[in-house]
Image (cartoon, rainbow, N blue to C red):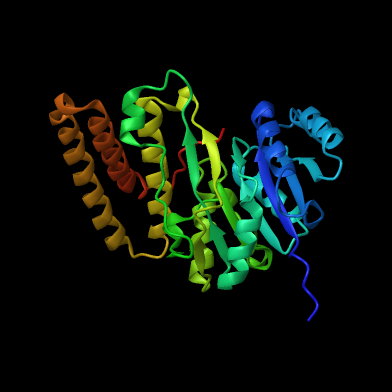
């Protein structure tokens, strides 16, 4: 039997004013053990001034065998940029990675292998935080930037899926109408969870590949109480607005009341446990913010996280 060629992969990258980090990502893609001839890199710049163009040109000169396609999406918003990467992609599989991440050399190989072995529709992998110098100890102790990990081959639900490290069958993604990523979420974020939730509802199956690691440096600007509370409130609001679309208004109202109770209860708890560790207080307040997000979800508003 003739050995089949590896499936074509399109690595989809959205970027916005992070040229130095984008260069690190592109270098990690150029060093993949997966055959360079079998994948392309789609970079969509969400900065209308094309601030990433110089880095792209330098990368092409340094790695001429790495197929890179670069275009600008002038409309501001992460969902607009993601949709453009999908529209430009020619691969059978779409691999998503963020512009502030970098991948281990066997990232694509492991993702493709597990996709084929389990005959699933998407494979997800871990995003491991890297902490710079001067990171407060309470941030590391609280593990605020760590996500759940699973044994390779574990089937997971949409709640564990994000596009920071994912591979999905292109046919599934491109079949969603009118667009793969909901542009109503362009400023708030959550457009990736929304896509995976839709895929799950269509019968899509997802597994975990724990060896396909990508890493992400957590900037000091995110290591603040205000950022963590804002993120918790925004992501919860977006999540529950998505859930409420398929629920009756009375059920959504009950969830909002429950969220209010959670918000108040964990806010008070955070004050009480302050003496035994600030990281515990912050963790409690983040849960509180997520509780209040359930209440805000009743209103048809979007909290901006991607300006």
- Indicate the position of residue 43 as horizontal and vertical percent values: 73, 42
- Residue 2: image quadrant is bottom right
* Farthest residue, direction front: 1
- Indicate the position of residue 179 as horizontal and vertical percent values: 65, 58
Residue 288 visible in the shown view: yes
- Indicate the position of residue 34 as horizontal and vertical percent values: 72, 54
* Farthest residue, direction left: 272
Q: Residue at x 32, y 43 (%)?
A: 290
Q: Is residue 179 left or right of residue 7?
A: left
Q: Residue at x 41, y 22 (%)?
A: 135
Q: Quadrant of the C terminus?
A: top right
- Residue 56 versus residue 187: which sits nearer the camera? 56
Question: Can you say whether 161 is above or below 171 in the image?
Answer: above
Q: Is residue 298 left or right of residue 66?
A: left
- Indicate the position of residue 113 as horizontal and vertical percent values: 62, 64
Q: Quadrant of the N terminus?
A: bottom right
* Farthest residue, direction top: 134
Residue 75 visible in the shown view: no
Q: Residue at x 31, y 34 (%)?
A: 142
Numbered disc total: 0
């Amino acid at each position: 039997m003739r050995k089949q060629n590896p499936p074509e992969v399109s690595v989809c990258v959205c970027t916005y004013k992070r040229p130095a980090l984008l260069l690190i990502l592109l270098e990690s893609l150029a060093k993949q053990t997966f055959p360079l001839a079998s994948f392309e890199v789609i970079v969509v710049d969400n900065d209308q001034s094309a601030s990433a163009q110089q880095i792209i040109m330098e990368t092409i000169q340094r790695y001429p065998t790495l197929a890179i396609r670069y275009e600008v999406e002038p409309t501001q918003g992460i969902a607009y940029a993601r949709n453009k990467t999908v529209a430009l992609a020619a691969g059978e599989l779409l691999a998503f990675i963020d512009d502030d991440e970098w991948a281990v050399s066997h990232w694509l190989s492991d993702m493709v292998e597990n996709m084929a072995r389990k005959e699933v529709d998407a494979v997800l992998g871990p995003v491991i935080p890297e902490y710079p110098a001067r990171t407060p100890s309470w941030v590391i102790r609280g593990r605020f930037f760590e996500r759940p990990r699973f044994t390779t081959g574990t089937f997971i639900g949409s709640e564990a899926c994000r596009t920071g490290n994912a591979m999905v069958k292109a046919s599934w993604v491109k079949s969603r109408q009118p667009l793969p990523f909901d542009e109503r979420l362009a400023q708030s974020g959550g457009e990736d969870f929304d896509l995976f939730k839709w895929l799950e509802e269509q019968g899509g199956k997802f597994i975990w590949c724990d060896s396909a690691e990508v890493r992400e440096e957590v900037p000091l600007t995110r290591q603040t109480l205000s950022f963590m509370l804002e993120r918790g409130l925004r992501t919860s609001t977006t999540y529950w607005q998505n859930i409420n679309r398929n629920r009756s208004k009375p059920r959504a109202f009950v969830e909002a009341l429950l969220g209010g109770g959670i918000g108040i209860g964990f806010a008070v708890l955070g004050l009480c446990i302050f003496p035994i560790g600030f990281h515990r207080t912050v963790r409690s307040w983040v849960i509180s913010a997520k509780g209040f997000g359930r209440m805000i979800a009743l209103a048809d508003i979007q909290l901006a996280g991607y300006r």
